[in-house]
Image: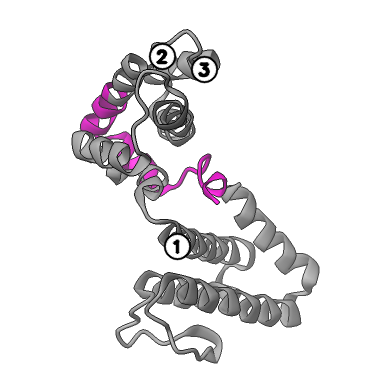
Amino acid sequence: MLNWFLGSTDDNLKKAALDQSVQDEIEGLMNFLLDLVNEPNRPLEELDRARQISHFAPEKQLAELPGVYLSLEQFAVEINPRKQIPQKTFRHLVAKQFPHLQQIPSFALIFLEEEFQRLELCRRFLQLVCNHITETFGQLRGDLGRAIANWIAAFPKPNGVPAPLGFEAVIPGDGPGRVAVLGKFSKVLYDNLAETTGHRAVGGIFEKAYQRLA
């Protein structure tokens, strides 16, 4: 599930890249992890990436961070022969010690429970679909893209924001139920666009959104 999100870059990431405190904490986190996994059977390739990351351009640092972190976290909580730390405990420690990194959507996602990870990924996917609708059709379907974006931004508590395309659904209180609602809406959106633009065009829009998360 997280692999969808690890390589993504978006406007939030670019804004975070301008924040020096975020870049400082990336370097601090890498040093923390490097000290922790300094063992004979350490993952050499990931250690090299961790050492190099602070020399990357800011946007690339943010794109690389989740994947490097997860690889070294796995060593710390599962493989490290000195001391295995429960994953939940380890993540709590990292989040507390490096709070500015929670500004990075793809990194903050790691620290959510799995059901909320799924929900955020579904929301992000639909937001990307909205962007591609506007890019592809311009003003022709721009109003639809904005309506969807507003609804997704308010989801799961619309607070009076109407669901686009006449979509009606009771929004459950649990994560899996909310994911199911977004899945149903995605199908309604796909079918609506396919009727007016054809399956090939809408398929390309959905594929582009998926590739941004892949």
Find residue 189 and report its horizontal and vertical position in percent.
62, 78
Secondary structure found at label 2: helix
Query: Where are the magenta residues, as a range?
Result: 1-28
2 in the magenta segment: yes
Q: Residue furthest top?
A: 40
**Reading the chain from its start, which is encountered first: label 2 or label 1?**
2
**Reading the chain from its start, which is encountered first: label 2 or label 3?**
3
Dominant secondary structure of the residues highlighted in magenta in the image: helix
Asked if 95 appears above or below 69 in the picture, the reply is: below
Picture disc at residue 51: 2
**Reading the chain from its start, which is encountered first: label 1 or label 3?**
3
Picture disc at residue 43: 3
Secondary structure found at label 3: loop
Observer-nearest of 17 and 137? 17
Residues at marks 2 and 1, CA–CA distance in whole angstroms:
32 Å
**Label pair 1/3, CB-CB below 8 angstroms:** no
